[in-house]
Amino acid sequence: MYCKIPIYEADFPEAVYDEAYARKTGTSMATPHITGIAALILQANPDWTPFDVKVALSNTAKVLDTNKYDVFAQGAGRVDAYAAAHPTALAYAIDEAVLDGTGAIVENLKGTVTFGPQPIKDGAISVTKQILVKDIKGSGEDYTVTVNTTKTYGDAKVTVDTPTFTLNGEQYINVTLTASQADAPAGSEILGYININGGGTEISLPFAADLSGVTPVEIKNYKITETDLSFNGDGVKDTAVLSFTLTGPVSPYYIELWDIMNPDGGAYGDGYIGYLSASSGTLAAGSYTLNINGNYRNWSNPSVVAKIPDGLYTIDFTAGSATGVVGDYVGPVVVKTTKPVIAGTVSEGIVTGQVTDKYIDYNAELAKYGLDYDLNEKLKASYVATINGVAGSPVPFNLAQNGSFSFLIPVGAESVTVIINDAAGNKGEQAFENDIKYEPVVTLSVDPTTLDLTSGETAQLTVTETSTPVVGDPTVTDVSGVATYVVADESVATVENGLVTAVGEGTTTITITHGENVVTVDVTVVDPVVIEPGVKLVANLTEVDLELGKEVQLTIKEVTTRADGSTSEKDVTKSAKYTVADKKIVSVKNGLVKANKVGTTTITVKNGKNELTINVTVSDAGTTEPEPGDNEPKVSLVVDQSELSLKVKETAQLVVKEVTTAADGSTTEKDVTKQASYSGNGSVINVKSGLVTAKKAGTQTITIQYGENKATVEVVVTK
């Protein structure tokens, strides 16, 4: 490479450029040059296949001095870029190759004639390969074919069956290797070039064959159990096992560490920093393992066992053998004891950050060789959210290939901890506080929300504060003893620590405050009812509907209420006296009512000084001629219970139905429990939509009305 920069020369006119160059060899120099030339060839010949490009590079290369450089040293020769891009003809060596793991055999067109191993110790050989010459420019020139053998053994030779030809599109040439039987030692081979020249075109194809029959010594199954290691003694990724098999003896051998990040480093400037194992002795054929525990010997001071420094390496095996150099490598292998470093910020509940780690640096270097990896295979990222003081489970997320990241903090979380676990067993953590503060929703409730009391009574209120976080279960706290209570009218009721005392008749409101929340309780107080002792009659039916000829049994009870509110009942059905207003319609005996004639009447029941009236309607389900007015449907109100016996605080549900009886005797029912109106609320009972609640011992009559019809229910409440 020659460099001359005019602007530099302008500034330094006395600068000497006689040695402004450098010479480099090896694949690191050849690869980029060949890649660029291949691109130029495809630009000039866009319809060419990769086989065409490869053959053109080989055919047109300039063969160097074969006395200095044999076929294995120089191959096809030094590339001629222009000639490769503009050939007149191309010569393809026709061969076969294994396509892939399926074992499929496919055609392989090359610029070299490969005979491979052809041992002659067991007999003479004759092997033929073919060359296909194609006219690229269509010029149809005359060509000569010659064989230039640069090395041979015994009488081995390579010949062609077509020494001259005129190229008319395509031409096949058979190339034959022959040799007599001989005891060929290792290194016995035939090398050379097949030259095809004509019309200003010079084509060469190198050939080679190994005649010795000696199998080259190889290293096989060279592998390592771990490619990510951290020799820090924590028991995680601290060791690995290197294993391989040798097919023959080798001597000497070296198992070395090559520094990918510094290929010109090491004691000898070749990138090798030291070795894991080496010997000038012989390593016999067989299988071997080498435990790698972090120790090695540095080439700068091999007498001292040192710890392998953090870095990116290949582990190379190099050895000599009777058949040549034996070598292989594994890698890249990462040795890393440092933890990932995490930095970032939080804005509006979003964490944005950057991971700094050697795996990121190594990936950038490996990308130059096409060996880069997905960073998330080496750095496993996750976060743990803390909600209501409790840390949750790790949530994985992906890093960008440069190590940056961004994610939304879960709703309700006070903080998150970002965790990075690297493939070598190192762990980095960083906590981030959420800049969005989530306050729980706090509510206040009271039970009960209404109170119905009698003067002198008490009732306990339960005041509850519920704190509901954005995420998670609510917290419920009884604050009855610490809440603030304000009574609108303390002449009606007073309250202390939630205990309400009824003072006097009236209504008032209790306002309860705790924190910023307020609830209210409506209070109704009535004065105690003075129970008048007395006796009354109660019937199981107050409205009777019968069909002509049918019977129904009445049950009559005498209910005695004492001064202390207690009650007692006595069945007086048989001893009571029954008076029927119209004896033609019904008759009664011992409470048994029998329907005699269609019509309506009343039964007056009397026992002692007490009496009650029962309404009776008799209808005819047969064919009796209707009396005037009987064609009109009759509507009555029926209650499922005509009397109730309850204890204080018990409840009972009445069912009220409107029954319509048509002229033909058919009936329809309609549930009017909720629509009916009820009277009878007082200190003894409360009734709403048919639900009767017993409050105090005593008796009370409930009058139910719906439309023009009424019904009554007698209620007796005992303690």
Image (tube, helix red, strand yellow):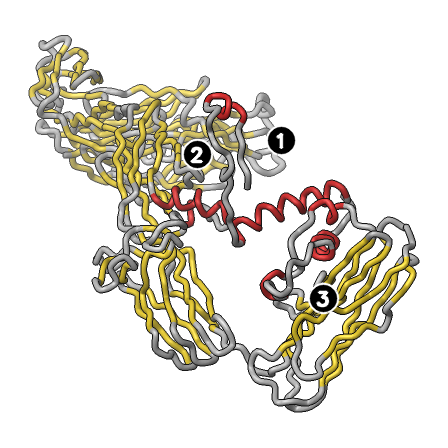
Residue 92 or residue 11, whichever sits in front? 11
Q: Which residue is drawn at the image coordinates 76% and 41% (left, top)?
A: 44
Q: What label sits on residue 586 in the rendered view?
A: 2
On the image, numbered disc 1 is attached to which residue?
625
Q: Residue at x 40, y 76 (%)?
A: 251
In the depicted structure, whether residue 615 falls above or below residue 130:
above
C-alpha span from label 1 to label 3:
138 Å
Callout 1–callout 3 Cβ contact below 8 Å: no
Q: Position of residue 317 (x, y in %)?
A: 41, 66
Per the image, the residue denoted by label 3 is 193
Q: How many marks?
A: 3
| Quadrant of the snapshot with the C terminus | top left
Q: Secondary structure at mark 1?
A: loop
Vertical relation: 46 (above or below) 404: below
Q: Residues within 10 Å of mark 1 (few under 14, many from 20)?
A: few
- The amino acid marked with disc number 3 is Tyr
Q: If you read the primary sequence from the N terminus, does the residue marked by circle 1 or circle 3 appear first? A: 3
Q: Is residue 606 visible?
A: no
